[in-house]
Amino acid sequence: MAHDLQQLTNYFRAVCEAFGYCPTTARVVFSAKGDDKAFCGCGEHHLVRLLKPATAEDMAIQFQQERSN
């Protein structure tokens, strides 16, 4: 599982510009390379640089947890 987490973390680092926590849902959201906005399931677009910071590993953990549900 640690190997899978590292692969997911590397993937998110490669394709995403920045990560942050949505203030409405507390979910990790990301902006794609070359963009500063992230779309969240709450229906809002967020400027990721203005959100509480998150990491690629936070995104990978969230992704793994969602897959296991």
Image (tube, rainbow, N blue to C red):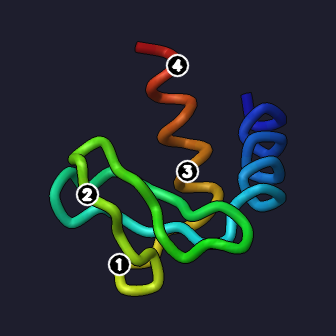
- Going by the image, does 43 lie left or right of 57? left
- Going by the image, does 48 lie left or right of 30? left
Which mark is first along the chain, 4 or 1?
A: 1
- Relative vertical location of residue 32 with respect to residue 47 in this rendering, above or below: above
Q: CA distance from mark 2 to mark 1?
A: 13 Å
The numbered mark at residue 44 is: 2
- Relative vertical location of residue 13 with respect to residue 9 in this rendering, above or below: below
Q: Are marks 3 and 4 in contact (CB under 8 Å)?
A: no
Under circle 1, the secondary element is loop
State which mark lies toward you, 2 or 1: 2
Q: Classify 10 Å Cα crowding around label 3: few (below 14), some (14-19), many (20 and above).
A: many
Residue denoted by label 1: 51
Q: Are marks 2 and 1 in contact (CB under 8 Å)?
A: no
The numbered mark at residue 67 is: 4
Residue denoted by label 3: 59
Q: Position of residue 14 (x, y in %)?
A: 83, 58
Q: At label 3, which amino acid type do we have?
A: Met
